[in-house]
Amino acid sequence: MRIIQGAFKGRRITTPRGLSTRPTPEMVREALFNMLGEGVVDARVLDLFAGSGGIGFEALSRGAQTAVFVEKNPAAVAVLRKNAAAFGCKDRAWILSADAYRRIPQLEGSRFHIIFAAPPYDNLNLAAILLGVARARLLADNGVFVIQIPSEMDALSAVKGLVLFDQRRYGRNQLCFYHLEASPEGEESPPQPPPAKGGQEESPPCQGG
């Protein structure tokens, strides 16, 4: 697996050997970033169920400000750190060794312009992920939350705080795009505080706002 575009174009992404991670196929990654376009530049990115970090590192390659990677498997976490060092972007990559389902609420207070989740398809709980992101208010104004699910799975059209606005199918996978539910007319958006502290000491947290 290689970086498609940007500063790291053509560089190989190391993946864990003998581990049942499911990297997002290159065709899907390319389609995703074509849709995101210039929105990636200077974005704060959250890569949930990160695996070897193909989405987060692709975003950093294309000019994202920071990327937070959440992955529970120790072998995959080691590979994430190895990739960050190899690409020379440790100062922009915050790697959290944690279960994404449990870590999402603990990120409350952070704001991300792009959130991507590629959860394992076995025992996938789509509602829990969407509600977790919505309740923790992780998505910045005008941000986008993209989740990769099986193509045959029915996407949720909305949860409290998030609304589905696009779906794209690519073979066995589909991408579902969500944005913030519109606030009632006249209601101001809530302030965006700085992020909760924590995570790997070697990498900086995202900034709020």
Image (tube, rainbow, N blue to C red):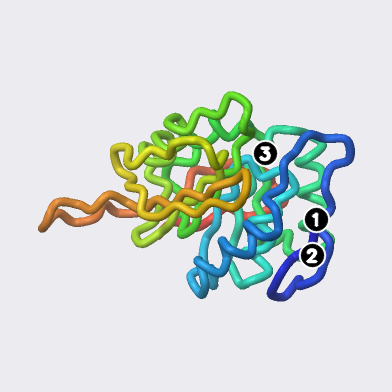
Kindly report the distance in space between the C-alpha atoms of the residues bearing marks 3 and 1.
Answer: 14 Å
Q: Which residue is mark 1?
A: 83
Q: Residue at x 70, y 51 (%)?
A: 53
Q: Position of residue 29 (x, y in %)?
A: 64, 59
Q: Quadrant of the N terminus?
A: bottom right
Crowd rating for badge 2 (residues with CA inside 10 Å; few <14, some 14–19, many 20+): some
Using the numbered discs, state the Cα–Cα distance from disc 2 to disc 3 in whole angstroms.
19 Å
Residue at left 50%, top 54%?
A: 168
Number of other residues with Cα within 10 Å of mark 3, as a class: few under 14, some 14 to 19, many 20 or more: many
Q: Name which residue lies at 82% across and 48% down.
A: 15
Tag 1: amino acid = Asn
Residue 113 pos. (x, y %): 46, 59
Dot 2 amino acid type? Phe
- Confirm or deny contact between disc 2 and disc 1 (CB under 8 A): yes
The residue labelled by disc 2 is 87
Helix, strand, or loop for circle 2? helix
Q: Nearer the viewer, residue 19 or 47?
A: 19
Which residue is label 3 attached to?
A: 71
